[in-house]
Image (spheres, rainbow, N blue to C red):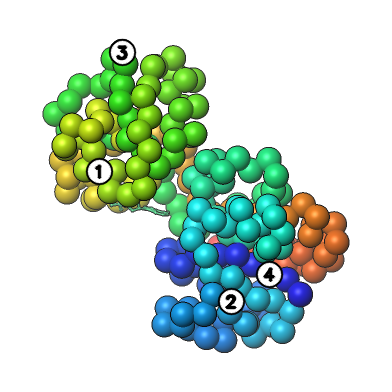
Amino acid sequence: MLTIAVSKGRIFEEALPLLSEAGIQPTDDPKTSRKLILDTTRGDVKLVIIRATDVPTFVEYGAADLGIAGKDVLLEHGAESLYEPLDLKIAGCRLMTAMHKDKPNISGRVRVATKYVKTARLYFASKGIQAEIIKLYGSMELAPLVGLADCIVDLVDTGNTLKANDLEPRELITEISSRLVVNKAAMKMKHQAIQTLINQFEITLAKR
Ligand code: AMP
């Protein structure tokens, strides 16, 4: 039996065709089902539906053998405890700094609001900028508008969310896409099944 951890939303939507090519289709509609463990058309594969930020944790502890997680989440989690064999090239976006459109670029000390505390700290340290990082769990865009922070670090796709809030992207921290992650013990114990799945994903990705 293989268990794959995925989060609902964009990653799941974009992972579905890849899973489907490997013969894995959920038997319940994940959009309407409240089940957290979904059976699939492959008797030996189950999907567990969890929050995106929990995917590395489930895989690290072996509660799921594999997972699909954004690179943003993996960077923040610290992915040394996981194998990351494949860039699935789905749910692409950029992790960026953003500021109010009328504000000049950062000079000196800066207050940064983000849910990516660890990644932001590393980034500003690498630039030699003294940053006070404020952890938020959502609506980062609000922080510069109400004087909570000078700058935010967040995912940017079309840039529309920033624009709608009078913010603009400034510096690219890193390009983001979703990755396949594998529990280290499972990679040994279930090597054949997992390697076959990786190969199937690779073939599908190569055709794109
Ligand atoms: P956009 O307005 O298209 O730039 O999208 C930005 C909003 O969507 C932000 O709130 C992001 O956190 C979220 N977002 C964009 N791309 C992704 C992604 N690949 N995975 C998760 N959230 C994303």
* Position of 18 relative to 44 (above/below): above
In screen coordinates, is 163 left or right of 179?
Answer: left
* Cα–Cα gap, marks 4 and 2: 9 Å
Q: Which residue is mark 2?
A: 37
Q: Amino acid at mark 4?
A: Thr
Question: Dividing the image into 4 quarters, which one contains the C terminus?
Answer: bottom right
Residue 108: assigned label: 3
Q: Amino acid at mark 3?
A: Gly
* Cα–Cα gap, marks 3 and 4: 48 Å
Q: Quadrant of residue 131?
A: top left
Q: Which numbered disc flags the more N-terminal residue, 3 or 4?
A: 4
Looking at the image, do the residues carrying marks 3 and 4 touch, with CB atoms under 8 Å apart? no
Looking at the image, do the residues carrying marks 3 and 1 touch, with CB atoms under 8 Å apart? no
Q: Which residue is mark 4?
A: 3
In screen coordinates, is 88 left or right of 31?
Answer: right
Residue pictured at 79% horizontal, 59% vertical: 186
Question: Depth check: 180 or 65 in front?
Answer: 65
Q: Which residue is mark 1?
A: 141
Any part of residue 59 in sight: yes
Q: Amino acid at mark 1?
A: Glu
- Relative image position of residue 179 (x, y in whole percent): 59, 53
Q: Ligand 1: does it lie within 8 Å of the C-beta at label 2?
A: no
Residue pictured at 35% horizontal, 33% vertical: 134
> Could you say whether the residue bearing mark 4 is in a helix, strand or loop?
strand
In screen coordinates, is 98 left or right of 86?
Answer: left
> Could you say whether the residue bearing mark 3 is in a helix, strand or loop?
loop
Q: Ligand 1: does it lie within 8 Å of the C-beta at label 1?
A: yes
